[in-house]
Image: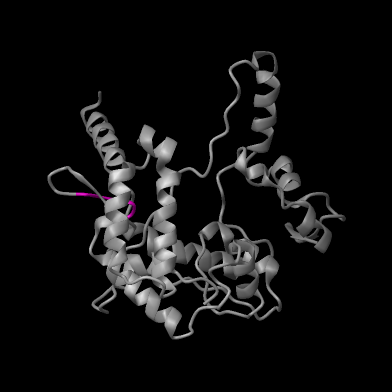
Amino acid sequence: LSYLPIDYIRQMYGVPNGWELKDDGTLVSAYEHPGQKEALEAGRAMVEAGLVNPDAFSAQWQEYKTWFANGTTFYTYDSFSAWPEFYQLRAGEGFQLQAFTVPKADGSGPGSSWIGSATNSITALNKNSADRAETLLKVLNWMAAPFGTQEYIFRKYGVEGVDHTLEGTDPILTDKGKSEVQLGLLYLTDAPWPIYLPGMPDEAQAQHDAQMAVVPSGVKNPVMGLYSETNAQRGGQIGQDVGSTQNDILQGRKPVSAWDDMVAKWKSDGGDKIRDEYQEALEAAESGS
């Protein structure tokens, strides 16, 4: 494994996607779910068994991708948006990507995957930029040109003959193009993403089939789209203890029982207030107020 897929393991043990909405309408943090410690125990056993790359806990995401694409490791954990990049990084033509659905940990049947965030980032224009707003909106509009347009092809594949060549109507990136088109423009705005891998229709079909197998039974985060001021201001800060405790447990520096102390601290440091704010926002949304 290039990366210990602890969130995948959590899904196997039925841990909720961020928050759990109980039948009585109350929210409970996924950190408090009993499956957390079962997942951590299973993850730690995988590390102890030597199934995870020894550099996994210090590596960056791009290293995980490279290890997987060049055959150093045979499993990685990533999003569907990374699917095309793996084919660009692959070491040989024999590379083939396959997605695994989530089974229940006890082997009794299929589990449920977490559905990701509806948005990746937000682009805002300064309210004091009225004299430039029209031009900036035109730029964003150009960048959001839909699939198949000249603007889309230029933004994604660059200049024909330089950054890509055509195989039929498919733009195939050259080595120069692979380095030149990797810009963060999509984080400003983008067109709806198609499932499209130029010159690789079978792989595109495989990605579509994988999504169709996962999405219908996927579990959404019940607070998606809701706002918590405390989470916005302090969520990242108090979440650092969560990450460090998790890594300490997985690498054997702390017992699994340390998770309970971390959860109690997270709740007192602001987690309970985050829950209360999400609860209030959820009730307001349901009432239409």
Q: Give above or below for 103 relative to 287.
A: below
Position of residue 137 in the picture relative to residue 8 (left or right): right
- At x 51%, y 60%, the residue is 79
> Where on the picture, by quarter, is residue 135?
top right
Q: Give above or below for 255 relative to 114.
A: below
Does the rendering let one see residue 16? no
- At x 24%, y 59%, the residue is 33
Per the rendered image, the range of residues in magenta is 17-21
| Numbered label tally | 0
Q: Residue 63 at what x, y percent from top left?
A: 64, 67
- At x 57%, y 64%, the residue is 204
Quadrant for the C terminus, please: top left
Q: Residue 256 at what x, y percent from top left?
A: 31, 70
- Majority secondary structure in the magenta region: strand
> Where on the picture, by quarter, is residue 112?
bottom left
Position of residue 269 in the picture relative to residue 141 (left or right): left
